[in-house]
Amino acid sequence: MIEFTLWPDWFAKARAGMAADWAAICELIKSEPVRPSKDKCRLIKLATFGDARTDKGSLRHDANVIVVTGIEGDHDAGGMAPEAAIEVLERHHLRAMIYTTWSHTPGVPRWRVLVPLSRPVDPDERLPLAEALNGLLGGCLAPESGALSQSFYIGWPAGAERTTLVTFDDPDEGYCLDELDVWQQYRRPFGAKKPDTYEPTAERKTQDDYLADLLAGDDVHGAALRVVGRMVRDGLTDATIRTVFEGLALKVRETRGAERAAELTGSELARMIAGARSKGYAQPNQAEPAARWPLIWLPDAKPHVSDPALIRGFCKPGAMLICYGESNSGKSFHVLDRDLCLAAGRPWYGRETAGGFVLYVAAEGTRSIETRVAAYRDTYLRDAGAIPFAILPAAIDLRQSKADTRPLIAFVRRIEDERGIKCVKVTVDTLARAMQGGNENASEDMGAVIGHADQIRAEIDCAFEFVHHAGKDTARGARGWSGLRAATDTEIEVVARDGLHTATVTKQRDYGKDGEMFSYRLRVIELGIDPYGHPVTTCVPEWADTPDRSDRKLTRAESAVLAAMHDVMTATRRTPPSSCWDAARPPKPGQYACPLPELREHLRRSGGVSDSAKPDSQDRAMRRAIQSLRDRGIIEVYDDWAWLADKADKGGQNGNCPPAKPGRGADGHGHHPIGVSGLSAHPDGHAFGGGEEGAEDGILEGAL
């Protein structure tokens, strides 16, 4: 049974202490009758209260809370539909109920969420649990959700859209919030409420305007809250607001009676003013501080030849890195290996490292990451002493501006001060868990995440790395917005094949060494025996030589892809757009390329690349073949285009780049982006004129 309290009205001078199971509480809220005005609605609180009263006789105050039996949250910003919120809670297997509020509309959704606890807790335990609920919902709850004695209206006006939702459509399904194993890692403090849009040119309301707002409808208290918020937003002082409300209260007394007028004066008015200011309604400061940027004049520019590297020839201080791969490709093992060597100051694949504090944010799979690190330490670093490497086992939000960026910077600085160490790198595993519900394909969301990563790099003066997932079409690189790659200094792709894992540098801004490969195998380590008598294992990476696969015979699927590329390029005779010059292996001037959508369509029309009749299986086989050809260096794929790469040269044909067709050059205007002739020279010194098709055939025959 869950104890809870029902208040007959906002003043809470009386209460009804009740106890019921969760299903009965949900049904009580669903069956709440229509009310003529909001101030006639009852309020609910998942807590019990004592008998101590305020000076105005209210029983509802923080000091009077005895125990807390559940958590309530209020979503008033209108940014998330109740159906979407229920889906989020169901993904976390949480038992919860959501009901829409008095002012809810389909266009501006407003709702309350209630979640039970498995046992009563002390009042000081409520806030961390409320912050966890806020974090589970992506930080969308209003600040008043964290107030200890805050109670919430139940009930609706006549004709209003009335929505009540229960997770899993069954109040008996799901876990209580405090039963989630890692609920603490979701904690997110409540931020200030977003202020109304402030328009400095807008005409300030008169006292008659405010009075009209107060007399519109029956909800005098709710109207008073809105009026106070507008006054605070308009820059009125507390004294001015009290003076205006003294006049308004006299008018309300004449029309609505003394009891309604009492809501507009004294301590109740002071509470409304303080609440409006604490929630961020105050007018923002329009003056912006003058920006100060350093300038380096041309005569003062100097080469930075003596700058140290974090990892020689691989990563510079302050660099931005992305390591991506498919699920189970071993990308986290690769990054952990590199970070642990960096922290220990030990060589990595024969390359010197700088040493220093490395923070690894394990935003997902925290227990697994900790287990891997412990196994790596016991295998390779037993004699290394105190290595400044730390795991942060929490999901963080780097998307929203007022979420975790600033707290993370302060957290790292505190560690630096306390331990006397310098942070050289922060790793976040994975990018998806640091977005907290953002869209990886949206430039707004990804741009915000990248911007906050840059802020961390700049203020801590460290390198930063995201561990990320490959896209559905692995040939197109990392998942999500293409601007992520543009913002990256070093990009690494991890691929697993036949038990060998290979990390390939696919972009290297500082060192110009794209294509470097670092291979490793995963050795199974037995850690102990579980309670059921079975061995518990994990893996540690063992460095291995990268085999040369370029001479392996092509598979049937790979041959079909190359043949289809030949057909498409012969038919279309197009050069790739200038964006493809950013690829790890860019095309030569005038080289023909094949748009991937046309390549796939051609393969489908010609029977595909496998024996399966299922379209999904055919598409997967195509993607694998394209990726394999790219891994072997036979083709390059970038920005939805494919072309033959340098490793396709079997007999010197790489000089045989056929000329671009007039009007179809790499920059879209018939000109090569680096200003060379449209005719490419043959090794014997002759130029190709009308033999374009033969030149392309020669390249493909060499590859085949």
Image (cartoon, grey):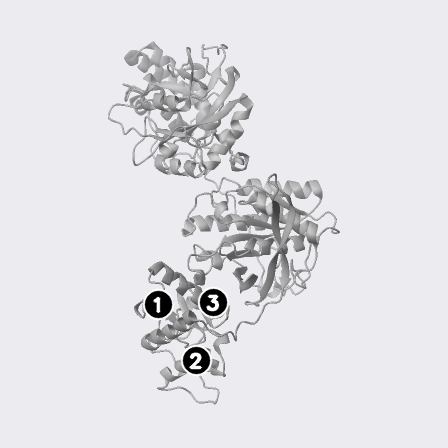
Q: Amino acid at mark 2?
A: Ile
Mark 2 closeness class: few <14, some 14–19, many ≥20 residues within 10 Å: many
Q: Is residue 324 visible?
A: yes
Q: Is residue 237 visible?
A: no
**Residue depicted at 61% across the width and 62% down the height:** 314
**Residue depicted at 34% across the width and 60% down the height:** 614
Q: Is residue 297 left or right of residue 556?
A: right
Mark 2 or mark 1: which comes first in sequence?
1
Q: Where 509 sits versus 666, above or below?
A: above
Q: CA distance from mark 3 to mark 2?
A: 18 Å
Q: Residue furthest front?
A: 533
Q: Which residue is mark 3?
A: 628
Residue 62: where, in percent of width, then height?
Answer: 51, 18
Q: Where 639 sits versus 15, above or below?
A: below
Residue 436: where, in percent of width, then height?
Answer: 46, 43
Q: CA distance from mark 2 to mark 1?
A: 23 Å
Mark 3 closeness class: few <14, some 14–19, many ≥20 residues within 10 Å: some
Q: Secondary structure at mark 2?
A: helix
The one of 657 and 181 positioned closer to us in this rendering: 181
Q: Is residue 220 left or right of residue 306?
A: left
Q: Amino acid at mark 1?
A: Gly
Q: Where 696 sits versus 233, above or below?
A: below
Q: Which residue is mark 1?
A: 608
Q: Residue furthest left?
A: 159
Residue 210: where, in percent of width, then height?
Answer: 33, 24
Q: Which mark is residue 699?
A: 2
